[in-house]
Amino acid sequence: MQLRYSFRLYPNGPQRSALARAFGCARVVYNDALRARETARAGGEAFPKTGDLSKLLITEAKKTEERAWLGEVSAVVLQQSLRDLDTAYKNFFDGLKGKRLRMGAPRFKSRKDNRQAVRFTANARWKITTGGDLALPKIGDVRVKWSRALPSVPPTVTVVKDAGGRYFASFVVETDIEELPETDAVVGIDLGLSHFAILSDGTKIDAPRFLRRAEKKLKKAQQNLSRKAKGSNNRTRARIKVARAHGRVVDARREFHHQLSTKIIRENQAVAVEDLTVKGLARTRLAKSVHDAGWSQFVSFLEYKAVRYGRAFHRIGRFEPTSQVCSTCGVKDGPKPLNVREWTCGACGAVLDRDINAAVNIAKAAGLAVSACGAQVRRGSVPAQRGEAGTHRDGQPTVVGIPAL
């Protein structure tokens, strides 16, 4: 399987300027190619091929006075921006055909976009130096903060600048499945808001509410930003402070999801979760709490880690009446309002905790009830997480780590 490892970069002043040029040149080529294809479509002409666009917008453009500065960056970066546009179109058309989730049509990029990225392939002859730096063509040796070893040699590296002005190196590598020792334990997981996750064994994991806890600091930073004059350096610095504050929330949430998902996968042979309608819930009054919980990211972590460690993973249909059925006798008692947290089954008299009962029913719906009593669980695999758009390759879970030198 493939994994994505991300590491923090610390470019110096000249290197930041060189990266800014690379981001800008890649963006210009991408926008020029998109404009050429949109013009051809509007005029009823044939769809321009990537090879023709490469010759016109890169090779020949470098010879003109208007685009001579394209020669200041690696040609590989410019070629990859054309491939990124091809990927964006493919994802868009596949969505229309029902082959994947629907995505919007490719749009023009802006220098004000929150995320900027360029990718270097093996043709660019980038490398990790003996001193641990990342040597990039026409940029130099960039200092990297390593934290773990890569399992194999990466064919590409993507350099990313986020909204907070932080730089990262992202590597996609092939890795073998690391099968963990078998265990008889299985678990159903009911995701919630007051408790982030409730397990079928009765364990309740409190919701950390990272966004709620940071709201006061975020509010102060955003108020400070609103008082700065537009276009001023002070406003730019204030905007970066707001972006970094949001970045800390995102990082803390991701770390929590990683730690919890790893613990659950290591301790259980099979895991079952409900396929929640996050988009629908995000349109209710609970929207902020739903986004703060980050259920989709947590479930995707469980899914890819199940594949990585040889565990079974199950998604239960969203219309399964997990909160209406008694997990003791199986009698359906009907829907209940959210404020009912505990109820008594009218058939068998069992007193049921709403969330734990739902978690047990999720395990049963996945066929794990017998296994929960001690039977062996067969290993199973699941598809990798959904493909990523833009410069990412398909199905790359992100791991913060360090490559071998």
Image (cartoon, rainbow, N blue to C red):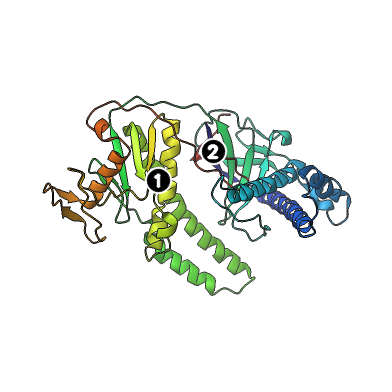
Q: What element carries label 1?
A: helix
Left or right, 41 with respect to 263, comes to right
What residue do we see at 71% from left, 53% from top? Answer: 27
The number of numbered badges drawn on the structure is 2
**Disc assigned to residue 363:** none
Residue closer to the observer: 15 or 213: 213
Left or right, 227 with respect to 138, comes to left
Q: Give neighbour class at mark 2: few <14, some 14-19, many 20+ (Cα, 10 Å).
A: many
- To which residue does mark 2 refer? 4
What residue do we see at 56% from left, 28% from top? Answer: 152
Vertical placement of 111 versus 93: above or below?
below
Amino acid type, label 2: Arg
Mark earlier in primary sequence (1, 2): 2
Vertical placement of 372 versus 36: above or below?
above
Residue 315 locus on image (x, y percent): 39, 42
Vertical placement of 386 versus 17: above or below?
above
Left or right, 141 with respect to 185, comes to right
Looking at the rendering, in which quadrant would you find the C terminus? top right
- To which residue does mark 1 refer? 257
Q: In which quarter of the image is residue 32?
A: bottom right
Q: Give neighbour class at mark 1: few <14, some 14-19, many 20+ (Cα, 10 Å).
A: many
